[in-house]
Structures are given as C-alpha cells and as structure tokens.
Image: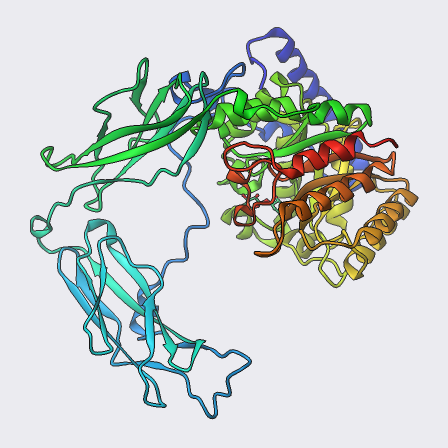
Amino acid sequence: MPDPDKPMYKLRTKMSRIYLIAACMALLAIAGIGCNASSDAPAQSSPDEPVAEDSAFNTAIGFTVTMDPGERLPQLQPEPQITDQEFEQGLPEAVVSVPDTVDPATNQPPFFIGLQNVTVEAGEMVSILFDPEDPEGDLPGMFIEKLPQGATFDDNFDGTKTFNWQPLQMDVGILRLTAVAIDPDDQSYLTTQAVLVKVTEAEDPASIPNVAPSLDPVRVFTARAGDPVVFELKGIDLNGSIPTIEIPALPDGASFNQHPRFEEIFVLKFIPTQAGELSIDVLLRDSTDPSLTANETITLNVSDDVSLQRDGERLKTLAQSRSVLIGFAALQSFYHQPDGALYASIAGQEFNVVTPENSMKMDTINPLPGRYQFAATDNLIAYAQHTDMQVRGHPLLWHRQLPDWVLETPIEDLESVMTQHINVLLDRYGNDVAFWDVVNEPINEDGSMRESIWFESMGESYIDKSLSQVRAMLPDSVLLINEFDIGMAGPKFDGLMQLLDRLQSRGTPVDAVGFQMHVFSSYDQFNELRANFQAVVDRGLDIHITELDVSLADGNASLQDQASVYEQIVSICLEFSQCRVIQMWGFTDQYSFRSIFDPLPFDRAYQSKPVYQALQSALSATP
Ligand code: XIL
C-alpha cells in the first residue's frame, strides 16, 4: 500500500469513495444492491489497519512491510475436533480397503483384537496392545499412521506391538490413533482401525514431568550471499510453556529478537557473506526450569550470483516483445522466509504480473465478521509496485477457503455478505489491481453450475451481480471467470461456454476467461486447448492463463517432457492476440501447492529447469 500520509494517496482514497457512491447508485439500477458498504469498510483508524513491521523481522528490500496489529485473529476451520460423544460411542469402525486382485470371500481381511478407546491423565503412561489377526491364520504386518510426539510403537516379538506414551499438558484432548493391519497374502489389502485416546487434565499438575523443549523443524533453504536472511524460530514445549531461544554464536552483524506479535517466535536476521553451507547452533531453554535445555542446528545453503545466473533474456523482456504479460502467484509473506530476498529478486527480474496465492482469499483477509487481515495483500502490492508488476486480484468469489462465519451465514443474508466483501476489497485495492478473478470455479465437471453457497443463495445471478458490481466500481479493470480443467474438450468447457452465452445475452460484463491449467506432464490435448481458446475469442473475450503448472506425472516423466508441455501451451497462447497473460502458480518448486510433483520452472535451490529454457524459446519464436 502507498504511504497513507501522502497527500496523493489521501486524494485517491477520497476520490475512490466518491466514486464508490456513484458506482453504488448505478448498481442500484443494475442489480438492486444497497449502498451502505463503503461506510462499513474499515477506515484508516480501524483496529485492523496494519502497522509498520520492524525490518529486523523480514527480508524485504525496497518495499515497506506492514503487519496486522494486535492479537492473531483466531484460526478458523480448525482440525475437526473429536467430541466426547464420539468417544463414548466406543471404538470407531474399522475400514477395509480391498484391492481388485482380492476376493474377500476366499481371503478375509485382517483385524485387530481386544482394542477399545482409552482414557489417560496427562503425565501418566498409557500402553495399548495391538494384536492383529488374519482369519486365514497367518501373521499380518502393521504400522501406526502417525505417532504423537514422544510415543513409541514397540515390537513384542510375538506378532503384537505396544503403543507406549506419556501424554503431557499440550496433549489434553482426544487423539485419534490410527493403526493399519496388512494382509499377509497381499500388501495392499489393509484394515485401518482407529483408537481414541482421551487425555484429561492432571489432578496434580506437579506430578507431570517437565520435558526439554524442542525446535519446530526448519527445512533446508537456499539463500544468496549478500542478501538478508530471516529465520523464524519457534520453540515447542509439550508442557505448554513457551521456551526461550538463544543463538550461542550469532553470525556477524546478526540481530535476534522475540517476535513483536507471537511470543513463541524468535527471529534471527543476518546477511551471509560467503557461498557454502552454513550451520547455526540453536539453544532452547525451558521457561520453568532454565537448566533444562536442548541443542539443535539449522542449516542454510548459500549460493552466489554466478551460480544463479541464467543465460538468455529474462522472461518478461521476451514476453513484452510478444505483447503478453508473464507472471506468477506469490507465496503469502515470502519476505518472512529465509530465502525471501532471493525469491523476491528472481521474481522481480523475470515477471511483470503477480497474483496473491492466498492472502486475498476470504478466510485469510476477512476471518471474522467485520475483521480484516490486510497486511499480506498490502505488502504484496507494495512489492508489485516496487518491481513494476501488475496485480491480479484473486478470487473475489469462490466456494473454497471461506471463513466459518460465512459458511454459517443464513442463505438469505449471503448477497449482502458478497456485496460487502467486494466493496471492501475494491475500495482498498481497486486502484492497484488490473485484473480480477471475480468468480472462481463456478462449473462442475459435468458442465452444470457448481452449488456453492453463493449459487445456493442467489442462483446463477450471483455471477451477474458480482461482475456488474465490479464493473460499476472499476470500469477499467479486466473481469474474469476463472476455471480449472478447461484445457480440453468436454462437458465442463461446454458448460462454461453456455454460462458465458447466458451472461452475454443478459448484458452482464465479462472480459476474459481464466484458464487455470494445473496439468500433468502427460497432458497432450493441445488441439482441444487451441479450439477452446478459439471458442473464447469467438465470444469477443480475452484469454488469460492464470495458474499454469505442469506436474511430473510419474517416475518416468522427464524434465524435458515437462518443458515441452509448457512450451506448447505458451506457443498456443501466442497464436491468439487475445491471449494476454500467462501466469504460473508459483515459480519455484520450493513453494508450489503441488511441490511433490516439482511442477515449476525453478527448482528448490532457484536453479532454472528445462522449463525455463522452454519458456524462453516459446516466447522468442518467430510469430
Ligand atoms: C491453492 C493454494 O495454492 C494453496 O496454497 C491453498 O492451500 C489452496 O489453494 N485453484 C485456485 C487457487 O484458484 O486459488 C488454488 O490455490 C489452486 C487451485
């Protein structure tokens, strides 16, 4: 966000409010929507207005980072809790998975005998015997899906194993312990059996042993010599207190501070000067017994500029010469990651358009009614302005990543929730966002309309209403419907085209179709993609590729196969002057929502992959 004290910004804000009222009045005519929203939008003095973050806590260079003020707003949509009632109902039913090759009539599934739900006091030991049997008389194998911290699963060398655990204060609640028995004749013939373990508060808390703290695991990162690095180190103590963290040998020039908002986090910031592997020792100290400590080590790979160099032209330079924008979706708060400076630098060199991967989603930006977390999106926009990138707003309306309060809103009130949401986001970001994914994923696989809460509340008109509202408020921004699985022929794409036909016949504004394009390296429906692009263009609409990534299909898929899919998709886009934007869903495999499939053009250490050369080649081919 621009500096709110700058007169220019105040003027713009004021104008956008005046404009909003006019837009709202226009809307009344179009869709009968109320005009109260802008006055409800949080003003600059709102308790949720982000505040400046000290640079000791981030890697940002050249743009200002703010943080949401005060307490962390409660995490909504927590892990589903197991209720006392469920616990009282007894042992959950076993689930058997039968492979095609097995006939359960001749080979019956293995099962566990003698299990029941267990209650234990925090601080006491609990032991549970797992005794799997096979109706055919052989000995089944077994494992436990996820052991709680400090627990063991010990072999009794008689076909049984014992789960041993001493739960502590942090474990109070009901845990689902999941054991799997493996049929002796077929390794994929499995019986999954859960046992519920209820850990109650200790009657005498002093009886609970005090255990040493530990460090929340830190994975390996690659940073660049000369760039700032931050490590957010989080201490864990199963006794429920917050350990302190010390760095016995601080790197030269390092700062080390407790996080201003999150007591349990300590932030180390320093600038590595030399390439190579760097190890830093970390000492955790128990807060109730300072003599109780734990030692851990974190490792950082430091690269130099030379090893990060890429041959040829940068992607955005090539894209510019083809009149197309090229970009990515940005990891939320990348400037809080150890490699955040390198991430920001490479993206700044390569791209000229960016989408916030998560920070604008409703559960993140508006987790409670009337309460907002704007900092992450504000910061992304500050970064985009600093690096001359355009911004895609994503998504205004979606059926996923909705806060609980919205899911619980009576259906008849959802229209005003929608209008208000759009007003708040457009009021704040309208000047800074060029493209809006107004409606995300409205179509089912069979081509019918997805029954999202928005659809249930307003029918298909939620699409007309939202598009009209955005057009009225921001006449110059580009409005999209964004959809996945439309890179091939089929009922889903047809359903989308029929929706567009209906919208257009009703005079509803829409400018472009967003093709997400999360595909696998086995993808080969290029002709169908071309035909789909043509169908969009035939309707007078533009094409944006909004979320491209190409997952490695299986162990045999090569990086060349992956590169070739990228190259062909980009080349087909460039066949159409109406294909204006190509964005990937991230750019490094380090931070992909499909990172297990390594789908992006840079690897985890920020080395370019064959995909990168393929993009260069597609963007520089003679039209
Ligand atoms: C994904 C993000 O990448 C994940 O981090 C998040 O957990 C789930 O959402 N289609 C979309 C994107 O429109 O918003 C989704 O992003 C990926 C699929």
Quarter of the view holding residue 516: top right
Please provide percent x and percent y for residue 311: 66, 25
Q: In this view, does 102 lie to the left or right of 272?
A: right
- In the rendered view of the protein, which quadrant contains the C terminus? top right
- In the rendered view of the protein, which quadrant contains the N terminus? top right
Quarter of the view holding residue 32: top right
Q: Which of 44 and 514 is in front in this view?
A: 514
Residue at far top of view: 7
Residue drawn at the location 82% of the way across and 42% of the way down: 572
Q: Can residue 17 be seen in this view?
A: yes
Residue drawn at the location 77% of the way across and 35% of the way down: 618
Q: Is residue 196 above or below residue 274?
A: below
Residue at far right of view: 538
Residue drawn at the location 90% of the way across and 40% of the way down: 540
Q: Which colour scheme is used?
A: rainbow
- Ligand 1's image quarter is top right
Q: Nearer the viewer, residue 3 or 189?
A: 189
Please provide percent x and percent y for residue 475: 80, 28
Please provide percent x and percent y for residue 490: 80, 60
Q: Is residue 22 visible?
A: no
